[in-house]
Structure formats: structure tokens, C-alpha cells
Amino acid sequence: MSVAIGVDIGAYKHAVAVCRSGEREADRRTLQISADRTGFRELAGWMGTLAEPISVVVMESSGHYWYNLASHLHRAGIPVAVVNPLESKYFGKRRLQRSKSDRADARTLAALGMHDQPRVQTPLAQSELREAARFTMRLVREQAEVCQRIQRLIDLGFPELREAWEDPTCVSALAVLRKAPTAPAVCRLRLETLAALKRPGEGGRAIGRAKAVQLQVLAKESVAAPEMEAQVAFEMRLLIQQHDFLDRQIAEAEAQLASLLDGETARRLLTIPGWARPQRPPCSLRSGTSGALLTSTSCSPTPACIRKNRARARRASGPRRAGPWPRRATPICEPRPTGWQSWGSSTIRSSAATTPESGRPASRR
């Protein structure tokens, strides 16, 4: 004989219920504890009054509020099962449960622990790695939002900057905006000073005289409203400082994430049969019309390698054809079956590419 305990997790209070072996429903009487040390002591005392041994304590993975209680119970030697909220939801629907409250949810979790017997495991296994990955991605999203705000200021203070750089928030463009955030500011700079602006970091390359001349020509013909110059320059300076700060934070967060991946987690993954460290895959690209497969086994699939293989595919496939679908190389995962060709965004059989009567292209599939 044993009992299963269900805990409905809340931000400041938790509801606790118990289901006994052989019973379909949990006991109507429940316990409510606070999410602090006092509540944990109260829960431990209540568990000590139970005559039957505890088989499992079931709780939902509701945000981060379950972390402390699950860790406390695990360190106390009590088996803990953390289930997906959808699992408990459909378990209640299966039993035609209609009431919805903290106490009712705790009774549902207790019954789930007794009848479905969810798997017991270390509750916070890999939680540090998961939190590090989430934090890094959160910083990346924040930096993306800052870049969008910088682009808005560029549209107000120097919209012609997009003619000089396709991405106005690239490293070279930001190097110019740090010194001259608006079109009038670019005009006021000496040509030698503008050409000597470098990317941040050691060995940063200067933008060069040709780019400086282009920027000053664009700035002199800019359509930016002069009434907004002072405010745009002020906001641009603060946003670029925020961008650089987030850049440093992302670098530190990625270093922390890499250290976690190189530690105990990687050693555990290497113990899984059939799992090995990922190898550098070959770069495979296929020409859009000729179907020629280009494979480079000596390079990793970096953007530079992809651009080089695309250029090689264009040279191998001859002159470009007229029409709205230009010939270009596209990355693929594996070769297509023999007799298939690419036509724009559609794929057709080469044997059915033309009709025997008219010689015109057959309908696309």
C-alpha cells in the first residue's frame, strides 16, 4: 500500500492532495502551503503523518515556480515526477472532471500519479543548460529589437545609408553612425576622417576612401528632415551604446553556454549508443537547371563557401535565361532522382517537359 501526492504549483501558494492505493479519486481534504521555507516545513510535517509510504509526488512544470519545491523534495529523498500541464489536463477530461480550482487540480495530479504512474526522474536535470540557452536567446531577441529601432532612426536621419549598405545595422554602418549619426553630420566630417573609421575590435578594417566619397555624396543629397537632427543623433548614440552592451553580454552568455556543453552534459551524451560528435558535413549545391551536383568535402557550410559554390554553379550552367525565374544554385540535402529538373520553384519530369505536338512546356505540377 502506498500513496501518491499531487501538488498544484502557484506563484506564492501550493495546493497539496493525496490519493491512496486502490482508490479512484483523491481524498477531498487538501492542504495549502506557502511557497517558502515555512510552507516546506509544513509539507514535511504533513507527509510524516501519513501511514503509507509515498510512491511519488506529482507536479506540473508551470513556469519556474516548481523549481524550488521539486529540488527540496528531491534532496529529501522523495521521488518527484514533473509532468506536462497538457498531460494532467487531458487526464482530467478523460475522467469527465468539470471543476477547475487549485484544490481540484491537486486532486487530479494525485490521481494521475496513482493510476498513470508517471516516470520519476531527477527534476532539475539539465535545467542549468536550458536556462542558459533561454537567456542567450532572450539577449539575441533584445538586440534584434534594438536594431529595428536603429533602422527607424536611420530612416529619419539618413535614409540614403541603405544605398551604401544593404544592412544599415552592419558593423561598418554602425562604425559610421557612432561618429556621424545623421546625414548633416556626415557632410561635416572631413573625407580623411570618414575614410579612416574602423570596425570595433583589434584589426578592424577601415571603410575606405571610396565608401567615404559615396557616403558624402549621398549625405549631400539626403532628404532627411533637418528639424529632427538633434533628437535623432541623441537617440542614435544611446541605442548604439545599448547595442554594443548587448553584444558583449551575448558573447559572455555564449561562452557560458559553451562551457556547459563541454562539461558533464557532453559526457552524458557521449554515453548514448549510436551518438557521436557531429562531423563537418559537405557543402552540396545543385544548379537550378542543369542538375549538376557540386560537392566540397573539404569545407564547412559557411556563407562564404555557399556563395563560392553558387558562383561555380552559375559558371557551369552557362548564361542566364530570360524570364522571372533566374538560374541560381540552391542548397539541397540529397540528389534528386534521375530524370527530374528544376523549373523556377516547381519540379517537373524531364521527359514530360515538352509536349510532342507543340514543343511547348508542359503544365507544371
Image (spheres, rainbow, N blue to C red):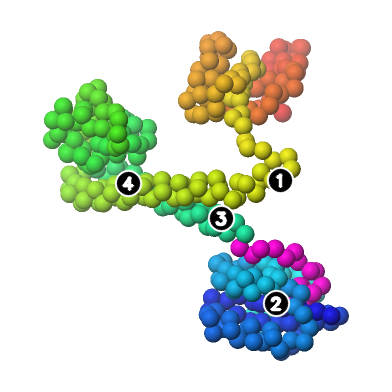
Which residue in the structure is indicated by mark 2? 6
Relative to 126, 217 lies left or right: left
Checking the image for residue 272, the label placed there is 1
User: Which of the 4 image quarters holds residue 130?
Assistant: bottom right
- Give the CA separation, mark 1 to mark 2: 33 Å
**Residue at which label 4 appears:** 244
Sequence-earlier tag: 3 or 2 = 2
The mark closer to the camera, 1 or 2, is 1
Amino acid found under the numbered disc labelled 3: Arg
- Crowding near pointer 1: few (<14 within 10 Å), some, many (20+)? few
- Residue at x-position 54% and y-position 85%: 38
Which is closer to the viewer, label 4 or label 3?
A: 3
Across and down, in percent, residue 68 comes to 56, 71
Does any portion of residue 68 appear in the rendered image?
yes
The picture places residue 246, in percent across and down from the top left corner, at 37, 50
Residue at numbered disc 3: 130
Asked which secondary structure carries label 1, the reply is: loop
Q: How far apart are marks 4 and 3 (CA)?
A: 25 Å
Q: Do the CB atoms of the residues marked 2 and 4 lie less than 8 Å apart?
A: no
Marks 4 and 1, the one that precedes in the sequence = 4
Is disc 1 in contact with disc 3, using a CB cutoff of under 8 Å? no
Residue range highlighted in magenta: 109-124
Instruction: Examine the rendered structure and indicate whether residue 12 appears above or below residue 269.
Output: below
- Check disc 2 and give the amino acid type: Gly
- Under mark 1, the amino acid is Ile
**Residue at far right of view:** 22
Mark 2, secondary structure of its residue: strand
Instruction: Say which amino acid is labelled 4.
Output: Asp
